[in-house]
Amino acid sequence: MSEGLNQVTLIGNVGALDLRYTKSQTAVLNVRLATNESHWDAKREKRIEHTEWHTVIVWGKRAEALAKIVQKGERLAITGRLQTRSFDDNRSERYATEVHAVNVILLSPHHRNEARGHLGTEEGNTRGQGDGSHGTGQPDEDGIIPF
């Protein structure tokens, strides 16, 4: 039996950022990302727009770095994997589907010179694997922030 592929790519605008820490002091950044679509109505008289909101989770040193340089309204490209979790809200069991980021690419114009490129996560970063102890946190000549 072959293995499947769990991969998603989103390009959208940041609605909110929330940096928290687990009990073991691992950083977790919750990013609300809005993606927009538009199409013409059936009579082609009016353009209809639709916004979809996604919850993106970034872990560890990358979460801390991203929280420092990204603000509401900025444009990001995110690749990651979908993960669904369940929880009980005292009335019934509920589910939430999140994107766990593997790579984050900063697309806003003011990041092109200071930090353009991507903030990879432990799984996706090819420069400085692992615990984030590598690199300076400053972008290299390609705009990639090594960790």
Image: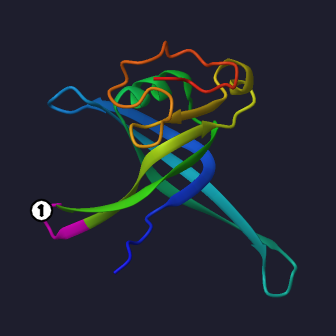
The image quarter in which residue 26 lies: top left
Find disc 1 in the rendering and name its residue. Answer: 90
Query: What residue sits 52% from the left and 42% below the top?
Result: 103
Q: Secondary structure at mark 1?
A: loop
Residue 92 falls inside the magenta stretch: yes
Rendered-image quadrant of the C terminus: top left
Query: Percent x, y for residue 15?
Result: 54, 43
Above or below, 12 relative to 129 = below
Q: Residue 55 location, x and y as percent? A: 43, 52
Residue at horizontal 37%, vertical 24%? 132
Residue 145 magenta: no
Residue 21: x percent and y percent?
Answer: 25, 30
Q: Is residue 54 above or below residue 68?
A: below
Q: Say few, some or many: other residues with alpha carbon within 10 Å of mark 1 (under 14 / 14 to 19 / 20 or more).
A: few
Q: Amino acid at mark 1?
A: Asn
Q: Which residues are magenta?
A: 88-94
| Quadrant of the drawing holding the N terminus | bottom left
